[in-house]
Amino acid sequence: MKICMLTWEFPPRIVGGIARHCEGLARALAHSGHEVHVFTLDFPGAPDYEEIEGVKIYRTVTELGHPNFLTWALLFNHFLEKKLGYVCQQVEFDALHVHDWLTAPAGISFKYRAKKPMILTVHSTEIGRAQGLHNPDSFAIDGMEWWATYEASKIIVTSGSMKGEISDHFHLPGDKIKIIPNAIDLTRCNTSIDRESVRRRYGVGSNEKLVLCVGRLVPQKGVEHLIRAVPTISWRHPEAKFLIVGEGWLKGHLEYLARSSGHGWKIRFTGFLPDSEVVALMTSADVLVIPSIYEPFGIVALEGMAAGVPVVASQVGGLAEVVEHDRTGILVYSRNPESIAWGVDRVLSDPGHSRWLTENSRETIQKTYSWDGIAKKTVKVYKEVL
Amino acid sequence: MSEEVPEEFRLLCMLHNIGATKMERSLSIKEICEWTALETSSVELHLRRLVELGYVQPIEAEGAGKYHLTPNGIRKVLTLYS
């Protein structure tokens, strides 16, 4: 099958989970014999075209700009469409797979031009990300998301909670939506890592506990609730140190909160780190905390489980489906520092139980979250609409 | 965009959306003011902060200072929309 995939992020342009999802899926589809063409946006240092593990990647440059984000998004869709038009003179695609609303305008035009069905993966929604629709841009994005779900022949979501959210909000028939979870490439987690040396790099001694948090520094990730939990965690575990990995517009505010907590010296913000370093940190940490208040899936939970670190996650959205409480991790109440502190204490106070959690979670990952399995399910959806 | 987003971050987003994402598409302060309709003093202030934070790279071109986003600056902007 010849598959055309549209996504606004693809490595090295990594922002959230979409880039990792598209990369994993594209590679697995190519690995199983399909011809995969990914159309995405440019990034400094990345070539306009390259082929990696059988995946053909086209990066388009947005030649025109505008300060307004929505106008810019429509402009980059025009350039994506231009590139698509060029490539489809040589390749007749069988399936068109669009990821999120950001590339939907180009996808919808291409759907009518190529007369091929469009499959849409909804990774998150504006109403969920912004916790409501608060301004004209939000309303416009919400409208574009609805439009993309309307134009799609089938919609893929990564969790049951996301299916519920979009079927309620966009009034979609249940049978139009398929749940296919995210997955994880376990080979990336099998590297032999010198745990002590990684911890030393970040100022964490062998007698200290490393509490790790990885995510974009935006409100939906709930990092402020972890910071508010630091005094309680520190009271029970004075040897705990906290590492917050990621970038985002909320960083300044979170740094201020950390300084104001009275425990600022224990909390370190690393900024963006490459995947290999994130894996090294996950493998070296004593606990991974995911304090999100909105999480359609939470691929970071899979990454932590695969790296063998005990996971403490908010009981929201997809996280509550990925993590099984007290079997593959610990679920805590979202927006609740006391509950987060309880979860971290549960892991740090009982190393035997923590080991049991990580053994269970690794087994679950191997059984349920392999890219090959997810690619097979995705191809089944493609075939349903062809 | 949320009301809580800091002013310098709004400028960073505008620079990104205009297309100042690589050296050859760097913009001068005059050009940035024209694109964004912001006051020169405000643009200068925010750019200074963005350079300090490593999100914007200043360069010398055609005898004047020009500015473009670094890869971290691009990632920072994209966190808002993803």
Image (tube, coloured by chain):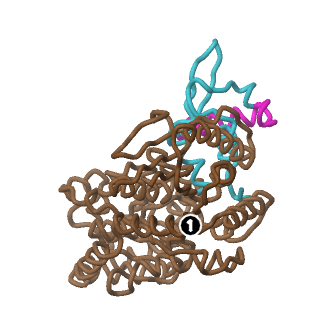
Viewer can see residue A261? yes
Q: Nearer the viewer, residue A318 or B9?
A: A318
Residue at the limit of the structure toward the bottom, as seen here: A326
The quarter of the displayed image where residue A257 is located: bottom right
Residue under numbered circle 1:
A385
The chain whose colour is brown is: A
Residue A301 drawn above or below residue A316:
above
Q: Nearer the viewer, residue A36 or A298?
A: A36
Give residue A190's position: percent from left, percent from top: 22, 60
Give residue A334's position: percent from left, percent from top: 53, 79
- Image quadrant occupied by the C terminus of chain A: bottom right
* Image point (61%, 75%), residue name: A176
Q: Nearer the viewer, residue A307 or A6?
A: A6
Viewer can see residue B52? no
Give residue A1's position: percent from left, percent from top: 44, 55
In this picture, which residue range is highlighted in magenta?
B33-53
The chain whose colour is cyan is: B
Give the SS element for disc 1: helix
Q: Is residue A80 left or right of residue A23?
A: right
Kind of residue at badge 1: Val
* Image point (59%, 62%), residue name: A120
Residue A72 drawn above or below residue A159:
above
Residue A149 drawn above or below residue A91:
below
